[in-house]
Amino acid sequence: MPQGRPLFMFRTHFSAPRELIVIELIYFLFVVGLSLFIYLKTKEVYQLTKHKGIYYFRKIFFYFSLAYTFRLINIIVIFSRELLGFFSPMRFGLGTILLVSYFSTLAILSLFVSLNIKNIKIEESNLESYMHIFAVLISVLVIFVRSYYLLIVIQIITFIIAILLTIFVSRKQKYPKFISKNIVTYALLILFWVINTLAFTRNLLPREIMIPVYVLSVSVFFSIFLRIKKRLRFI
Amino acid sequence: MAKKRERLEIIYDILRIIHDNRNKIKITPLLRYSNLSSQSFYEYYNELLEKNLIIENNDKKRKLISLTDKGFKYIEKYKYIIEFIEDFEL
C-alpha cells in the first residue's frame, strides 16, 4: 500500500468506466433499496415498542444505505474525467471518503450495539454521542493517514470484538448459542462491505470476481429483507 | 423460579387487562391485576401514557383508563413483534 498518496489516485485495469458505473449503479439500487425497505418496514414496530434493540437494528441499514450512497458518489468522483470530462476537485473526493468512513463506521457500531443491547449499561443519549464521536475520529484519521486499509482494519476489529462479546455473553446463558444465524448474516454483511471498500480504492477486483461478489452481497441483504417481510407480514 | 417478565410482555399484560375489562378500568384494579409493585406499575403507567398507548378519561368524577388506537394495535401485533425480536436476537 503506497502511503501518502491521495486515496482517489489509485488506478484500475478497468478500461470501460461507463460499464463499471452501470454495474455499480445496479448494485447500489439493490443494496440501498433493500436497506431502506428494512429501515421503513421496521418503523412501526419501533414506534409501538420504542425497543432499543430495534432502534439500533434499523440504524444498521439506515447508515449502510448512506455509506453505499456515498460509496457510489466516490466512484463517480474517481471516474469523473472519463465520465464527465473533467477532474473533480480533490476536496470533493476527500469529502465523500470522509462520509463513507463516517456512515460505515456508524453502521458497524450500530450492529455492535444491537448485538449486545442487553449488556450495555450506558445511557442511551450518551451511547449515541460516543458512537458519533468514535465515527468522526475514525473518519478524520482515515483522511489524515489517507489509507482505506486503516478503516478496514478498525471496522474488522470492531466487528470481531462485537462477535466475541456476544459469544462470551451467550456462554453465561442457560442454552448458549455460539454461532447463530444472525452472527453469520452480520459477518457476511461486514465481509462484503470490506470487499466493497477494497474495490473502491481502485484496487478493483477482476470483473469475473466482482459481479459474483456483488450478487452474493445483494443476497445477504435480500435474505434479511425476506426474514423481515415474513416476520412483519401483518404489520 | 418463574422467569422474570420482559418489559414488552409487561406492557402487553397491562394493555390486555384494560382490553379484557371492556376497555374501561380504574387505576386501583389495574394495579392489582398487573401483578407489579406500586412503584414499577406507575413507571409503566406513565410510560404508556407518554407513548400514547392508553388514555385517562374522567367519567362521573372517576378516572377510567382506556386503550388508544395505538394500544389496540400493540395488542394485535404483539405476537409478531415478539417473533421479530426473538428472530433477530434484539
Image (tube, coloured by chain):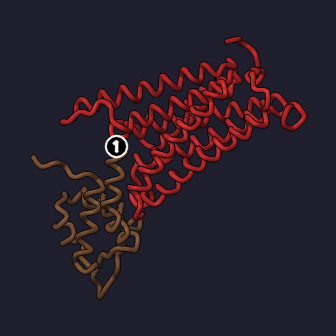
Chain colours: A red, B brown
Q: Amino acid at mark 1?
A: Glu
Q: Chain of mark 1?
A: B
Residue, x 69% and y 42% (percent of image)? A25
Left or right: residue A223 versus residue A77 is left
Residue, x 41% and y 67% (percent of image)? B52
Say which of B33 and A112 sits in front. A112
> Which residue extends farthest top?
A2
| Residue topped by disc 1 | B89
Residue A66 lies, with reference to residue A150, above or below; the image says: below
Residue A3 at x, y = what percent?
70, 12
Asked if residue A172 shows in the view, the reply is yes
Say which of A179 and A121 sits in front. A179
Say which of A48 and A20 sits in front. A20
Residue, x 44% and y 43% (percent of image)? A124
Residue B53 lies, with reference to residue B1, above or below; the image says: below
Residue, x 75% and y 36% (percent of image)? A19
Asked if residue A133 shows in the view, the reply is no
> Which residue extends farthest front?
A208
Residue A57 lies, with reference to residue A77, above or below; the image says: below
Quarter of the figure with residue B36: bottom left
- Quarter of the image that includes the C terminus of chain A: bottom left
